[in-house]
Image (spheres, rainbow, N blue to C red):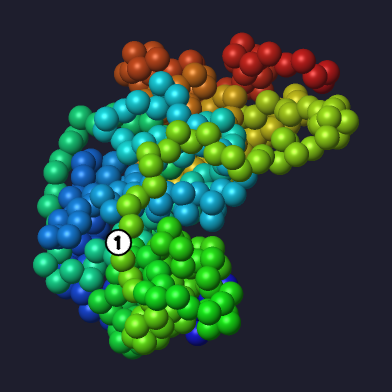
Amino acid sequence: MATNNVMTYTRIENYSSSDVTTLKSMFTNKQLIKLAKNLDILSQRGATGKVLLNSPAKEGQLNIFYGRLLYTTSDIHRVRRWERAVRLHCPEWNPRTSQQLSDPEKPWEYLLLYDGISKNQITISQAKAVIRTVTLEILFSMSHYPDLTHKWEGNPESKSELSLGLSLCYREIEPIFTKVTQMQNLFKQADFENLNLNLAPVPKKPISPEALSGWGKYLQGDLTLWDIAYKLQKSALAVTKTLLPLVKKGLLQLQTIPDLPEPNFKSSLPTVTKNLPTVTKKKIDKTKPKKKQLIACIDDSPVVAQTLKNIVKPAGYDLISIQDPIKGFVKIAEHKPDLIFLDLEMPNANGYTVYQFLRQAPLFAKIPVIIFTSRNNLIDRSRSKLIGAAEFMNKSAQQEEILKTIKKYLSITSKH
């Protein structure tokens, strides 16, 4: 929820599209304008690498894959920021490390989000919300420095994982810059524009509990202004407006505090199933309906998808239609289909490129992909075989042939 355009903590997805005005009319920070423009260029180029953020006080980086934002990191309170964002958007999730998460090219936070999605512990939407919140905090914190600079460091050899699904396109990044600017304007109006929210308020001298009005437990020197805003589920500005007068009176002082220790991700947060009694667990397991095998149709034509649906539904399968493959990676990752029909000719993507991304991402690597096209020629048939597609089928194939091919790769236990 937002009051008077002030964000409640950093839950930025609560803003409607009408709240997002153009960057030109909103931005006052020249470095942010330049950074936003460069990210737009990188997006159009489909570049892969890192945007390094530098200021005398801190450093950060935006990890970019094919023009999309994977994750943003900063050397100030990296773990604190991660834990706040996870608790805000994924309160039931207990992230854990494993040997499989080791990848020097990807931030550990991104790898944990990817791992959580792969294990159905969190959704793509939750993971993206974490990335947005972390990015907003870092950009807001670093934008106070007039000498902030950024530099592009390309790495075209970086390999894909869930990168297209668990990443933000420029249209998703742009509103984050707008929210940063909105916060800057509000803090400037309140005369707090140079305030560092990574500082912790602590009593400068003994203060009576009555004077603190219940704030005492947040002033023990272990919580930053960002942390307190999260705890109270209030905007950082609202917290600042309450505490800064006490600083000016000499009752509180703002001091730096260390980051939390590198986490082992064995959080004590209980999961829903942990708290359920044994009897309830059995009841849930017993009554859980059997999931139908799912087929995805990646084709810009809704007619083709409907035709396939009419064929596979009576045979006991479900089908989802993906008309825009780039945006559709999120949907594919969320639903995890058992089989994919892939067109070669689409307005926004080349089918072979889409196939390459599917094969490079561990989440999709073992899903059989059937090239389903009207281009019935020897070149495409040979190329499909060469890249490892399960089958090459013409769109004019008969119902019996389609079902026979599906059954070849999927075992059906239900009667039909």
Which residue is at a point 33% across and 71% down the rendered structure image?
254
Q: How many labels does the image show?
A: 1
Query: Along the line of sight, which residue is nearer the eye, 326 or 267?
Result: 267
The residue type indicated by label 1 comes to Thr
Relative to 88, say whether 389 is above or below.
above
Which of the two residues, 357 or 372, is positioned nearer the viewer here? 357
Front one among 329 and 144: 144
Q: Is 136 drawn above or below residue 183 in the view shown?
A: above
Q: Where is residue 387, by image quadrant?
A: top left
Query: x, y (%) of residue 352?
Result: 35, 29
**Residue at x 26%, y 33% (from the top left corner):** 105
The answer, for residue 71, to whether it is visible in the render is yes
Residue 164 pos. (x, y %): 39, 40
Horizontal side of 18 relative to 195 (left or right) equals right
Q: State whether residue 199 is above or below residue 97.
A: below
Residue drawn at the location 68% of the way across and 26% of the way down: 293
Residue 307 in the image, given as x and y percentages of width and height:
64, 36
Q: Where is residue 404 in the image (x, y as percent from the top left)?
A: 65, 14
With respect to residue 320, does 218 lie above or below?
below
- On the rendered structure, is 5 left or right of 356? right
Judging depth in this view, the residue of 145 and 208 nearest the camera is: 208
Secondary structure at numbered mark 1: loop
Q: How crowded is mark 1: few (under 14 residues within 10 Å), some or many (20 or more)?
A: few
Classify the position of the C terminus by image quarter.
top right
Q: Residue furthest top?
A: 408
Residue that appears at 75% across and 24% down: 315
Pick out the residue farthest to the front.
206
Query: Where, by quadrant of the figure, is residue 200 drawn?
Result: bottom left
Left or right, residue 368 beside residue 177: right
Q: In which quarter of the image is the N terminus?
A: bottom right
Q: Mark 1 points at which residue?
A: 256
Residue 374 visible in the displayed image: no
